[in-house]
Amino acid sequence: MRTVWLNGEFLPETEAKVSIFDRGLLFAQGVYEVSPVLDGHYCNWPHHAARLERSKATARITDDTDWPVVLSQLIARNNLTEGRVYLQITGGAPEDRDFLSPVPNVPATRFAFTQDVALVDIPKARTGLKVILHPDRRWTVRSAKTTQLLYAVMAKELARDAGVDDAWLVENGVITEQTSANAHIIDARGVLVSHPVDSGVLPGVTRINALAIARDMGLAVEERPFTPDELYAAREAFVSAAGSLVLPVVEVDGRPVGSGTPGPLATEIRARYIALLRHG
Protein backbone atom coordinates (compact mmCIF):
# COMPACT_ATOMS: atom_id res chain seq x y z
CA MET A 1 0.00 0.00 0.00
CA ARG A 2 1.21 3.48 -0.87
CA THR A 3 2.39 5.80 1.89
CA VAL A 4 1.28 9.44 1.68
CA TRP A 5 2.17 12.51 3.73
CA LEU A 6 -0.55 14.66 5.34
CA ASN A 7 0.03 17.63 7.63
CA GLY A 8 3.28 16.31 9.07
CA GLU A 9 2.47 12.58 9.17
CA PHE A 10 3.34 9.67 6.93
CA LEU A 11 0.24 7.50 6.63
CA PRO A 12 -1.16 4.61 4.59
CA GLU A 13 -3.19 6.20 1.80
CA THR A 14 -6.42 4.68 3.16
CA GLU A 15 -5.97 6.51 6.47
CA ALA A 16 -5.35 10.01 5.06
CA LYS A 17 -8.42 12.23 5.46
CA VAL A 18 -9.25 15.93 5.14
CA SER A 19 -12.24 17.90 6.39
CA ILE A 20 -15.33 18.41 4.22
CA PHE A 21 -14.86 22.11 5.04
CA ASP A 22 -11.40 22.25 3.52
CA ARG A 23 -11.11 25.34 1.33
CA GLY A 24 -9.46 23.34 -1.43
CA LEU A 25 -12.55 21.14 -1.65
CA LEU A 26 -15.12 23.93 -1.33
CA PHE A 27 -13.48 26.74 -3.32
CA ALA A 28 -10.50 25.21 -5.18
CA GLN A 29 -8.30 27.45 -3.02
CA GLY A 30 -5.36 25.17 -3.48
CA VAL A 31 -2.01 25.11 -5.25
CA TYR A 32 0.20 22.21 -6.22
CA GLU A 33 3.44 21.09 -7.81
CA VAL A 34 4.44 17.86 -9.49
CA SER A 35 8.00 16.74 -10.16
CA PRO A 36 9.26 13.85 -12.26
CA VAL A 37 11.13 11.19 -10.31
CA LEU A 38 13.99 9.42 -12.08
CA ASP A 39 16.47 7.04 -10.48
CA GLY A 40 14.77 7.62 -7.12
CA HIS A 41 15.22 11.40 -7.08
CA TYR A 42 12.79 14.24 -7.69
CA CYS A 43 13.95 16.83 -10.21
CA ASN A 44 14.12 20.58 -10.79
CA TRP A 45 13.23 21.58 -7.23
CA PRO A 46 14.54 25.20 -7.38
CA HIS A 47 12.18 25.95 -10.29
CA HIS A 48 9.26 24.19 -8.63
CA ALA A 49 9.91 25.97 -5.34
CA ALA A 50 9.97 29.39 -7.00
CA ARG A 51 6.70 28.74 -8.83
CA LEU A 52 5.11 27.37 -5.65
CA GLU A 53 5.89 30.59 -3.81
CA ARG A 54 4.27 32.64 -6.59
CA SER A 55 1.22 30.37 -6.64
CA LYS A 56 0.78 30.57 -2.86
CA ALA A 57 0.94 34.35 -2.98
CA THR A 58 -1.72 34.44 -5.72
CA ALA A 59 -4.01 32.06 -3.81
CA ARG A 60 -3.31 33.78 -0.46
CA ILE A 61 -2.04 30.64 1.19
CA THR A 62 0.67 30.60 3.86
CA ASP A 63 2.90 27.58 4.38
CA ASP A 64 6.53 26.99 5.37
CA THR A 65 6.82 23.22 4.97
CA ASP A 66 10.34 21.90 4.31
CA TRP A 67 9.21 20.17 1.14
CA PRO A 68 12.58 18.77 -0.01
CA VAL A 69 12.81 16.71 3.18
CA VAL A 70 9.19 15.54 2.89
CA LEU A 71 9.48 14.57 -0.77
CA SER A 72 12.76 12.74 -0.34
CA GLN A 73 11.39 10.69 2.56
CA LEU A 74 8.15 9.98 0.72
CA ILE A 75 10.00 8.69 -2.34
CA ALA A 76 12.18 6.49 -0.12
CA ARG A 77 9.23 5.10 1.88
CA ASN A 78 7.48 4.12 -1.35
CA ASN A 79 10.65 2.70 -2.95
CA LEU A 80 9.88 4.85 -5.99
CA THR A 81 12.44 4.69 -8.78
CA GLU A 82 10.54 6.30 -11.66
CA GLY A 83 7.31 8.26 -11.63
CA ARG A 84 5.96 11.45 -10.13
CA VAL A 85 5.69 13.11 -6.75
CA TYR A 86 2.88 15.59 -6.05
CA LEU A 87 2.46 18.12 -3.29
CA GLN A 88 -0.66 20.18 -2.64
CA ILE A 89 -1.45 23.00 -0.25
CA THR A 90 -4.94 24.39 0.40
CA GLY A 91 -6.36 27.29 2.36
CA GLY A 92 -7.04 24.97 5.28
CA ALA A 93 -10.16 23.70 7.01
CA PRO A 94 -12.10 26.24 9.11
CA GLU A 95 -15.10 25.20 11.19
CA ASP A 96 -17.64 26.14 8.53
CA ARG A 97 -18.01 27.30 4.93
CA ASP A 98 -17.30 30.96 4.19
CA PHE A 99 -15.98 32.63 1.04
CA LEU A 100 -13.62 34.79 3.10
CA SER A 101 -10.55 33.16 4.56
CA PRO A 102 -10.73 32.92 8.34
CA VAL A 103 -9.10 35.70 10.34
CA PRO A 104 -6.72 34.76 11.82
CA ASN A 105 -5.93 32.21 9.13
CA VAL A 106 -6.36 28.54 9.95
CA PRO A 107 -3.36 26.32 9.16
CA ALA A 108 -2.98 25.25 5.56
CA THR A 109 -3.81 21.68 4.63
CA ARG A 110 -0.68 20.06 3.18
CA PHE A 111 -0.30 16.68 1.58
CA ALA A 112 1.93 14.81 -0.84
CA PHE A 113 1.87 11.48 -2.67
CA THR A 114 3.79 9.52 -5.26
CA GLN A 115 2.79 7.82 -8.50
CA ASP A 116 4.69 4.81 -9.81
CA VAL A 117 4.50 5.32 -13.60
CA ALA A 118 6.86 5.03 -16.54
CA LEU A 119 8.19 8.33 -17.86
CA VAL A 120 11.04 7.34 -20.15
CA ASP A 121 10.09 4.19 -22.06
CA ILE A 122 6.52 5.03 -23.04
CA PRO A 123 4.70 4.32 -26.33
CA LYS A 124 3.63 7.93 -26.92
CA ALA A 125 7.26 9.01 -27.08
CA ARG A 126 7.65 6.72 -30.09
CA THR A 127 4.28 7.31 -31.79
CA GLY A 128 3.52 10.92 -30.82
CA LEU A 129 0.31 12.53 -29.62
CA LYS A 130 -2.83 13.25 -31.62
CA VAL A 131 -4.65 16.39 -30.53
CA ILE A 132 -7.59 18.60 -31.40
CA LEU A 133 -7.99 22.35 -31.07
CA HIS A 134 -10.55 23.59 -28.55
CA PRO A 135 -11.57 27.03 -27.24
CA ASP A 136 -9.72 28.17 -24.12
CA ARG A 137 -12.36 29.25 -21.61
CA ARG A 138 -10.35 28.86 -18.41
CA TRP A 139 -10.09 31.56 -15.80
CA THR A 140 -7.49 34.17 -16.68
CA VAL A 141 -4.99 33.70 -13.82
CA ARG A 142 -3.24 30.70 -15.36
CA SER A 143 0.29 31.56 -14.33
CA ALA A 144 -0.43 30.22 -10.81
CA LYS A 145 -0.47 26.42 -10.55
CA THR A 146 -3.81 26.08 -8.79
CA THR A 147 -6.41 23.35 -8.54
CA GLN A 148 -8.83 25.26 -10.78
CA LEU A 149 -8.71 22.41 -13.30
CA LEU A 150 -12.35 21.72 -14.21
CA TYR A 151 -12.02 23.10 -17.73
CA ALA A 152 -8.88 21.06 -18.33
CA VAL A 153 -10.80 17.96 -17.26
CA MET A 154 -13.66 18.86 -19.62
CA ALA A 155 -11.33 19.43 -22.57
CA LYS A 156 -9.40 16.21 -21.94
CA GLU A 157 -12.64 14.23 -21.84
CA LEU A 158 -13.83 15.87 -25.06
CA ALA A 159 -10.53 14.84 -26.68
CA ARG A 160 -10.97 11.28 -25.44
CA ASP A 161 -14.51 11.25 -26.87
CA ALA A 162 -13.01 12.34 -30.21
CA GLY A 163 -10.55 9.43 -30.14
CA VAL A 164 -7.40 11.52 -29.66
CA ASP A 165 -4.93 12.09 -26.85
CA ASP A 166 -5.51 15.68 -25.76
CA ALA A 167 -6.56 19.21 -26.76
CA TRP A 168 -4.62 22.36 -27.55
CA LEU A 169 -6.48 25.45 -26.37
CA VAL A 170 -7.15 28.50 -28.55
CA GLU A 171 -7.95 32.01 -27.35
CA ASN A 172 -8.31 35.17 -29.46
CA GLY A 173 -6.95 33.37 -32.50
CA VAL A 174 -3.76 32.01 -30.91
CA ILE A 175 -2.84 28.78 -29.18
CA THR A 176 -2.19 29.11 -25.46
CA GLU A 177 -1.20 25.63 -24.29
CA GLN A 178 -2.30 22.03 -24.03
CA THR A 179 -4.77 21.23 -21.25
CA SER A 180 -1.98 20.40 -18.78
CA ALA A 181 1.23 21.07 -20.68
CA ASN A 182 3.02 23.85 -22.52
CA ALA A 183 2.71 23.72 -26.32
CA HIS A 184 5.48 24.39 -28.84
CA ILE A 185 6.08 24.20 -32.58
CA ILE A 186 9.07 24.08 -34.89
CA ASP A 187 7.69 26.42 -37.53
CA ALA A 188 8.14 26.35 -41.29
CA ARG A 189 11.43 28.27 -40.93
CA GLY A 190 12.84 25.80 -38.41
CA VAL A 191 12.36 28.17 -35.46
CA LEU A 192 11.05 26.90 -32.12
CA VAL A 193 8.03 29.02 -31.19
CA SER A 194 6.50 28.95 -27.70
CA HIS A 195 3.80 31.11 -26.14
CA PRO A 196 5.43 33.64 -23.79
CA VAL A 197 5.08 33.10 -20.07
CA ASP A 198 2.39 35.46 -18.84
CA SER A 199 -0.97 35.18 -17.08
CA GLY A 200 -2.32 33.27 -20.09
CA VAL A 201 -0.14 30.18 -19.67
CA LEU A 202 1.57 28.29 -16.89
CA PRO A 203 5.33 29.00 -16.57
CA GLY A 204 6.31 25.38 -17.00
CA VAL A 205 9.45 24.05 -15.35
CA THR A 206 9.95 21.54 -18.15
CA ARG A 207 9.41 24.39 -20.63
CA ILE A 208 12.34 26.31 -19.10
CA ASN A 209 14.60 23.32 -19.63
CA ALA A 210 13.28 22.45 -23.09
CA LEU A 211 13.90 25.95 -24.42
CA ALA A 212 17.39 26.03 -22.89
CA ILE A 213 18.20 22.69 -24.52
CA ALA A 214 16.88 23.93 -27.87
CA ARG A 215 19.14 26.98 -27.69
CA ASP A 216 22.11 24.74 -26.83
CA MET A 217 21.27 22.72 -29.94
CA GLY A 218 21.60 25.90 -32.00
CA LEU A 219 17.90 26.40 -32.60
CA ALA A 220 16.46 29.89 -32.82
CA VAL A 221 13.72 30.34 -30.21
CA GLU A 222 10.88 32.86 -30.33
CA GLU A 223 8.68 33.28 -27.28
CA ARG A 224 5.51 34.61 -28.88
CA PRO A 225 1.95 33.49 -29.54
CA PHE A 226 1.37 31.36 -32.62
CA THR A 227 -1.79 30.66 -34.60
CA PRO A 228 -3.54 27.44 -35.60
CA ASP A 229 -2.43 28.09 -39.18
CA GLU A 230 1.20 28.17 -38.03
CA LEU A 231 0.62 24.89 -36.23
CA TYR A 232 -0.90 23.28 -39.33
CA ALA A 233 2.14 24.41 -41.37
CA ALA A 234 4.75 23.51 -38.73
CA ARG A 235 7.57 21.04 -39.29
CA GLU A 236 7.14 19.62 -35.79
CA ALA A 237 5.14 20.15 -32.62
CA PHE A 238 5.64 18.98 -29.06
CA VAL A 239 4.47 19.50 -25.51
CA SER A 240 6.40 19.77 -22.25
CA ALA A 241 5.23 18.98 -18.72
CA ALA A 242 6.63 17.55 -15.51
CA GLY A 243 4.32 14.57 -15.69
CA SER A 244 5.22 13.55 -19.24
CA LEU A 245 8.55 15.33 -19.88
CA VAL A 246 8.69 16.18 -23.62
CA LEU A 247 6.35 14.44 -26.07
CA PRO A 248 6.01 14.95 -29.84
CA VAL A 249 2.66 15.84 -31.40
CA VAL A 250 2.05 14.25 -34.80
CA GLU A 251 -1.56 15.15 -35.63
CA VAL A 252 -3.92 18.04 -35.00
CA ASP A 253 -7.58 18.09 -36.03
CA GLY A 254 -6.94 15.04 -38.20
CA ARG A 255 -4.10 16.72 -40.11
CA PRO A 256 -0.52 15.44 -39.88
CA VAL A 257 2.04 17.74 -38.34
CA GLY A 258 5.07 17.69 -40.62
CA SER A 259 5.65 14.11 -41.71
CA GLY A 260 3.01 12.81 -39.29
CA THR A 261 5.70 11.07 -37.21
CA PRO A 262 7.72 12.25 -34.19
CA GLY A 263 10.09 14.95 -35.43
CA PRO A 264 13.86 14.66 -34.99
CA LEU A 265 14.22 17.92 -33.06
CA ALA A 266 11.48 17.14 -30.51
CA THR A 267 12.93 13.65 -30.14
CA GLU A 268 16.40 15.08 -29.51
CA ILE A 269 15.09 17.61 -26.99
CA ARG A 270 13.32 14.80 -25.12
CA ALA A 271 16.46 12.64 -25.08
CA ARG A 272 18.65 15.50 -23.86
CA TYR A 273 16.12 16.45 -21.17
CA ILE A 274 16.01 12.89 -19.82
CA ALA A 275 19.82 12.86 -19.73
CA LEU A 276 19.79 16.20 -17.92
CA LEU A 277 17.39 14.90 -15.28
CA ARG A 278 19.44 11.76 -14.76
CA HIS A 279 22.70 13.60 -14.36
CA GLY A 280 21.49 16.88 -12.88
Image (cartoon, grey):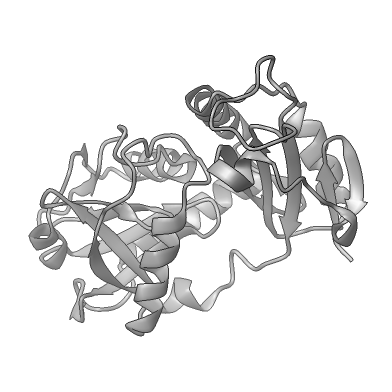
Residue at screen point 51% across, 41% down: 146
- Image position of 117 with respect to 65: above or below: below
* Residue 165 in sight: no
Q: Nearer the viewer, residue 217 or 238?
A: 238
* Residue 174 in sight: yes
Q: Position of residue 233 (x, y in %)?
A: 10, 65
- Where on the picture, by quarter, is residue 53? top right
- Image position of 94 with respect to 146: above or below: above
Q: Nearer the viewer, residue 98 or 118?
A: 98
Q: Is residue 215 left or right of residue 32?
A: left
Q: Position of residue 255 (x, y in %)?
A: 17, 79
- Where on the picture, by quarter, is residue 208? top left
Q: Position of residue 15 (x, y in %)?
A: 90, 56
Q: Is residue 9 left or right of residue 180?
A: right
- Where on the picture, by quarter, is residue 39? bottom right
Q: Position of residue 29 (x, y in %)?
A: 56, 37
Q: Residue furthest top?
A: 104
Residue at screen point 87% across, 49% down: 76
- Image position of 138 with respect to 54: above or below: below
Residue at screen point 82% across, 42% down: 6
Which quadrant does the C terminus fall into?
A: top right
| Count of number-bearing discs | 0
Which quadrant does the N terminus fall into?
A: bottom right
